[in-house]
Image (cartoon, rainbow, N blue to C red):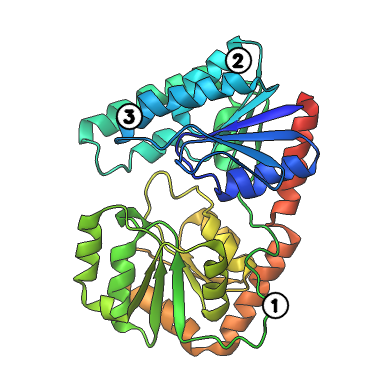
Amino acid sequence: MKVCHLTSAHQRNDTRIFLKECISLAKAEFEVSLVVSDGMGDTKCKGVSVFDVGKTKGGRLSRFFSTTQKVYEKAVELDADVYHFHDPELMFYAYRLKRLGKKVIYDVHEDLPRQLMSKPYLSYITKKVLPFLLERIENFLAARFDLVITATPFIRDRFLKINKNTIDVNNYPLLEELHSADHYIQKKNQICYLGGITAIRGIEALVKACELIDGELVLAGKFNSRELEEKVRSLPGWKKVKFLGFINREEARKILAESKAGVVTFLPEPNHINAQPNKMFEYMSASLPVIASHFTLWKSIIEDNDCGICVNPASPKELAQAMNTLLNKHTKGLSYGKNGRQAVENQFNWAVEEKKFISQYHKLA
């Protein structure tokens, strides 16, 4: 079976799309191609043929109207049996592929209507009207696709109401990718945050908490705006921040091995409270204690597995208390880290999700 994954917004080495789904399909002896738009050219890697339609020139509107068309044209040219798309902006083109007699899979990474409610660049009225309209369009089209794959059980339950062929394939980590067997590595007096840096992911409270900690915060990722970066750099707590910018997966592995805990303290936005952030499970996979937001779902993961501390993400004082606990209490941190790693080995890993994922493709075949 010829399988073609489509994305107009993600990089070719995206963890979910390429490292997990595409490579898993290639290992299962499907003929796999991936269409991207990053300007890095065509290539073949780990059994996956990558086709580049060129980097988007311009902003979101250019990507929405121009890049999506190019991705669709390349998809038609490749003439696959199954098309698996990853961005809501490709929905209409995916429906056209369905009308051509192709099998189509919609991979829902985020709860789009709830995600839009948190976009800072949208006006108050737009945040009310746009999610309402897009949810109805998304539901109409999703009901007509052959399979809907969601990144969380919460999103799965939403789509099950409109398409019975819906399953969740969770973003659990690759078991050994970020886990270090180098026990000789001395933990530094630091806590890390790895990932995109935005206001709604709690960066201001996190840096303010650094004023009160007995160590250092290693911050790795890209700020989503220059204004936010300037604002955060001006905070007194920034003097205890080691900012690395964007790092690759191997560099991330090293930072995790050296740190005493990992932080994922998103603010209670509509798209966050029922999400399952990759970073939470990646910290657990690397045997790191987790400091996480005190959402009900997140507490059920962290506290039920005794692998970290849940706090109010908007409270620098609570954040600092949790950070100091894990910086200063070595035995407690080791216990949390061991429990988190065990939970990943038993339940929260890609090997478990991979079986579910591949079985759905065999059903389509």
Q: Is residue 138 left or right of residue 125?
A: right
Question: Can you see residue 77?
Answer: yes
Which residue is labeled 2 in the image?
Answer: 98
Q: Secondary structure at mark 2?
A: helix
Query: Residue 279: percent from the left, percent from the top?
Result: 52, 60
Task: Residue at 60%, 71% (x, y): give it.
Answer: 307
Determine which residue is flagged by label 3.
Answer: 62
Q: Amino acid at mark 1?
A: Ala
Q: Do we see residue 162 in this rendering?
A: no
Q: Amino acid at mark 3?
A: Ser
Image location (x, y in percent) of residue 87: 49, 33
- Assign a secondary structure to mark 1: loop
The residues tagged by marks 3 and 1 sit, at their Cα atoms, a distance apart of 45 Å
Q: Residues within 10 Å of mark 2 (few under 14, many from 20)?
A: some
Q: Which mark is residue 331?
A: none
Residue 336 image offset from top left, x and y in percent: 61, 76
Is 162 above or below relative to 115?
Answer: above
The amino acid at mark 2 is Lys
Q: Earlier in the sequence, mark 1 or mark 2?
A: 2
Residue 246 place in picture, x, y as percent:
42, 62
Q: CA distance from mark 3 to mark 2?
A: 24 Å
Name the disc covering residue 181, or none: 1
x 58%, y 42%: residue = 151
